[in-house]
Image (cartoon, rainbow, N blue to C red):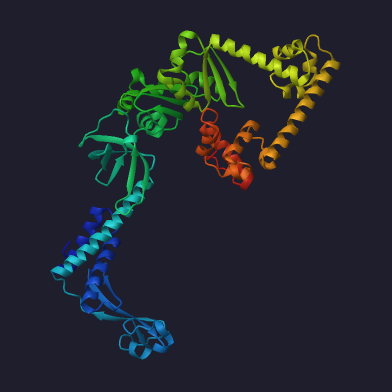
Amino acid sequence: MSFESMPRQDLLLAIDSLAQEKMIDKDIVIESLESAIAKIAKHKYGEEFHIVAQIDRKNGAIHVKRLFDVIESPESMGDEYNPNTMLTVDKAKKYASNPSVGDVVEDMLPEPEFGRMAFQTARQIMTARVREAEKGRQYEEFKDNIGDIVSGKVTRIEFGNVFVDINGKAEGYIKNTELIPNERLAVGDTVRALILDVVRSNSSPQILLTRTHNMFMEKLFTQEVPEIYEGIIKIKSVARAPGSHAKIAVETQDPSIDAVGMTVGIKGTRIQPVINECHGEKIDVILYSEDPAVYIVNAMQPAKVAKIIVDEDTHTASVVVSEDQQSLAIGRRGQNVRLASQLTDWNIEIMNEVEEQEHRTKEFKEKTELFTSALDVDETIAQLLITEGFRTIEEIAYVEPAELNSIEGFNAELVTELQNRAKAYLSKKEQDYFDNGHKMGINDDLLKADFIKRETIMKLTEADIKSLSDLADLASDELIDILGADNMSERLANKIIMKARELAYGIVPDADEE
């Protein structure tokens, strides 16, 4: 924009046009032009002066001023006195009728002439200021859109990273690791992706895009299925092996609606666009359930489950299938069971009926040995207890005596003795636990924690985690690294750490964090 000899109303129109083109506030353009004019004026009148320029927002008139601070005397300012920017009250009367100490007086200067070099300087300053404002606008606009899907054209590809022009507003890029495996994009292709993050930078903001994130698939279904968009059907969880296989769990509170059928659509009309966008990814839509056993059975589709055993303490499920269903349940390279585990956030073990029988036999033997040793009884009594459904010494110690008394061959005297022995065993076990913990330097606050298994607490000492605050300071991935991914899911790790923070520091998670 050249404002040399430009009529002032035309100057305002040019400012409006530039502001609209760059989608920034008009005042930002005016302020950048004022800075440019002030720079030119300083070059003409002297850099040592405090010179400002103002553009009248109504008529476009340009006012250039030299400003002075009114002081009592040079001596009163000491080393800070500057004759180029300060005037005493008497000298300030030249520019104001009744100045007083602390006022700022103005010396109106002629508008500088805008020669070629001056114009170049002004344009450079304006361009820099407008570009900075444009970057700020882009950052503010896109940071509020993290988690949204955007569409754009591929402008270039460098080292496998794809750069995308987002509707002419900004440039985003998809790292090669965030692209669906085996898909090939070319310059000029239109591509959809999820905004993963927006990062400030010295150039334009970096808009990080992804096509592999679980939320990308979730947002695609939101666009394709009106009932999901309206909240009638909710997506509870998504698990993906991008480009290969995915599972998505849905639910609805409306009993008249088939959540799975609505999501898939008649003859797959709703799910097919999502499959196409995800490069042919096979998608299993399953029904969510609050009952973990039902949920896991659903998640194992297309395999048919014969039996399931869930362990709430270890968050582990043993899924039993017939031999001809085992390979389908596991999936190619373990993909089906892995996705089911990710979807449900349960550790899932697959076994066929023969393996399950062997497992039960082994477990029966181990329980028999435990009861025989802990209660000092013979195998017959131990196996009777197991057959009646008792699995732990705690159950025997604290169950209602009548329940034990109902076992054939048991009487009140035997029941009392068994429960006394069970309690004595648990008491000694408790004392041994604290004695060993103190020897290892573990604080009582961690030893007494009832939200984490005692075996896990002992394992934590290998990483020098010996107090609740030590545990609270961990990130979930650090806890998983210490205990192993097979023993600790991300959900359980987060739950443990949040509870430790609550107890150690009084930090109570809000509903979203929970």
Q: Is residue 443 left or right of residue 82?
A: right
Question: Residue 71 versus residue 162: which sits nearer the camera?
Answer: 162
Does residue 444 sit above or below 202 in this rendering? above
Please state the horizontal and vertical placement of residue 174, each as a whole percent of the image: 31, 39
Dividing the picture into quarters, in which one does residue 85 lie?
Answer: bottom left
Residue 383 in sight:
yes
Q: Quadrant of the N terminus?
A: bottom left
Number of numbered markers: 0
Question: Residue 19 versus residue 46: which sits nearer the camera?
Answer: 46
Residue 9 in sight:
no
Q: Is residue 389 left or right of residue 265?
A: right
Question: Residue 483 versus residue 115: which sits nearer the camera?
Answer: 483
Q: Quadrant of the C terminus?
A: top right
Dividing the picture into quarters, in which one does residue 78 lie?
Answer: bottom left
Please state the horizontal and vertical placement of residue 192, each as a whole percent of the image: 30, 35
Given the current orientation, which residue lies at the most extreme right position? 413
Question: Residue 379 versus residue 423: which sits nearer the camera?
Answer: 379
Does residue 137 sit above or below 49 in this rendering? above
Given the current orientation, which residue lies at the most extreme bottom position? 90
Please state the horizontal and vertical placement of residue 239, each as a whole percent of the image: 43, 28
